[in-house]
Image: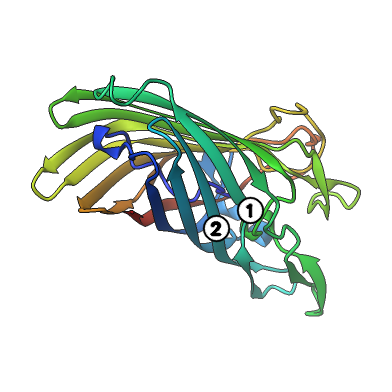
């Protein structure tokens, strides 16, 4: 399943409030390797193409710029770049690898704290609204191999495409609350609503069907604690859930092809702040999963499924000016 949200929130901390006019730039990296094929909640590698799971490897970098207009209002721009490859068994009974690299879909989001940070240092809630531009290609070319070994041009799998092919509306929220002197509870979420129903890319299930532009969401919640105050080192532990929805917020159900799934992770992390610089690492580890059939599925067709990573790796750096 594609994961369009490249980097995790750092979790809420009172000292994370920017000053008016402050600029923060960052770079984040995400890695995943997926080679476990799931149908429903269970792993079934034998149900992958020709009885074998697919093997995906994805590397993503996101450059971000966040500018604080006032104590409460800020605007952020995220520009992703990714490279991914897919290795799978084809009808010629050989493994072939395809890849795609380039810029992804750019996000621009404005957000606001509900309460004045000067009045509520122990906790706050931020709400954001933005847009996603279809700057990443959703039709990167590859090849199919026939039983005779001949290759023909084909569009690469959705999972390694650089974009989804449509404009989107991005809703986000973040909250934190101090529960002890140096400990915080945090929660954050993002929902990407895509008004566009489908692309002109042919479905792998039916030549008359097209690929959907599905909605996605990601939510996180947990606890963080400053364990080394002199070094500004913070540990966090929580849960993360990523999903591709069966129906869209705008448009509802449709009969285009998609791979609806919900995947949950244990989400440990560590961050360190020194001066104006912050470094962080998160390694979410898969805890549960559920692939479901989309609304176009008909009894007798191959059931919906896909490959999932056992863990994700997020590494990031931010600097405030």
* Residue 306 drawn at (x, y percent): 61, 49
Q: Nearer the viewer, residue 108 or 243?
A: 108
Precedes in sequence: disc 2 or disc 1? 2
| Quarter placement of the C terminus | bottom left
Q: How many marks?
A: 2
Establish if 90 lies above or below 14.
below
Indicate which disc residue 305 carries. Answer: none
- The secondary element bearing badge 2 is classed as strand
Q: Residues within 10 Å of mark 1 (few under 14, many from 20)?
A: many
Question: Gap in Å between the C-alphas at discs 2 and 1?
Answer: 7 Å
The answer to whether the residue labelled 2 contacts the one labelled 1, judged by CB atoms less than 8 Å apart, is yes
Residue occupying image coordinates x 61% and y 63%: 103
- The secondary element bearing badge 1 is classed as loop
Q: Tell me if 30 is positioned left or right of 110 in this view.
A: left
Q: Nearer the viewer, residue 106 or 209?
A: 106
* Residue 290 drawn at (x, y percent): 55, 36
* Residue 254 drawn at (x, y percent): 80, 32
Establish if 186 lies above or below 143.
above
Q: Residues within 10 Å of mark 2 (few under 14, many from 20)?
A: many
Q: Identify residue for label 1.
A: 105
- The reply to whether residue 283 is visible in this rendering is yes
Establish if 134 lies above or below 212.
below
Residue occupying image coordinates x 8% and y 47%: 230
Q: Identify residue for label 2.
A: 80
Q: Tell me if 49 is positioned left or right of 26 in this view.
A: right
């Amino acid at each position: 399943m594609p994961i369009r949200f490249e980097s995790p929130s750092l979790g809420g901390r009172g000292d994370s409030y920017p000053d008016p006019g402050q600029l923060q730039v960052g770079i984040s990296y995400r890695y995943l390797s997926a080679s476990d094929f799931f149908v429903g909640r269970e792993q079934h590698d034998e149900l992958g193409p020709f009885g074998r799971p697919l093997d995906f490897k994805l590397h993503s970098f996101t450059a971000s710029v966040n500018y604080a207009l006032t104590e409460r209002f800020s605007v952020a721009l995220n520009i992703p770049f990714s490279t991914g490859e897919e290795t799978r068994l084809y009808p010629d009974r050989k493994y072939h690898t395809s890849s795609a690299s380039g810029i992804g879909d750019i996000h621009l989001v404005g957000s606001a704290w509900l309460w004045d940070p000067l009045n509520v240092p122990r906790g706050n809630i931020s709400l954001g609204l933005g847009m996603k531009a279809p700057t990443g290609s959703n039709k990167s070319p590859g090849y199919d191999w026939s039983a005779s070994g001949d290759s023909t041009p084909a569009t690469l799998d959705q999972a390694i495409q650089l974009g989804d092919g449509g404009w989107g509306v991005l809703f986000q929220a973040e909250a934190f609350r101090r529960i002890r002197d140096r400990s915080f509870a945090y929660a954050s979420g993002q929902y990407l609503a895509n008004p566009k129903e489908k692309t002109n890319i042919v479905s792998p299930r039916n030549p008359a069907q097209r690929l959907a532009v599905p909605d996605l969401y990601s939510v996180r919640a947990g606890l963080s604690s400053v364990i080394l105050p002199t070094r500004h080192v913070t540990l966090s532990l929580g849960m993360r859930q990523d999903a591709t929805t069966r129906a869209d917020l705008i448009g509802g159900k449709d009969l285009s092809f998609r791979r609806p799934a919900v995947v949950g992770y244990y989400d440990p992390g560590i961050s360190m702040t020194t001066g104006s610089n912050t470094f962080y690492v998160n390694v979410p580890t898969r805890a549960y999963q559920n692939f479901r059939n989309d609304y176009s599925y008909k009894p007798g067709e191959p059931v919906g499924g896909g490959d999932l990573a056992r863990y994700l790796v997020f590494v990031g750096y931010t600097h405030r000016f």
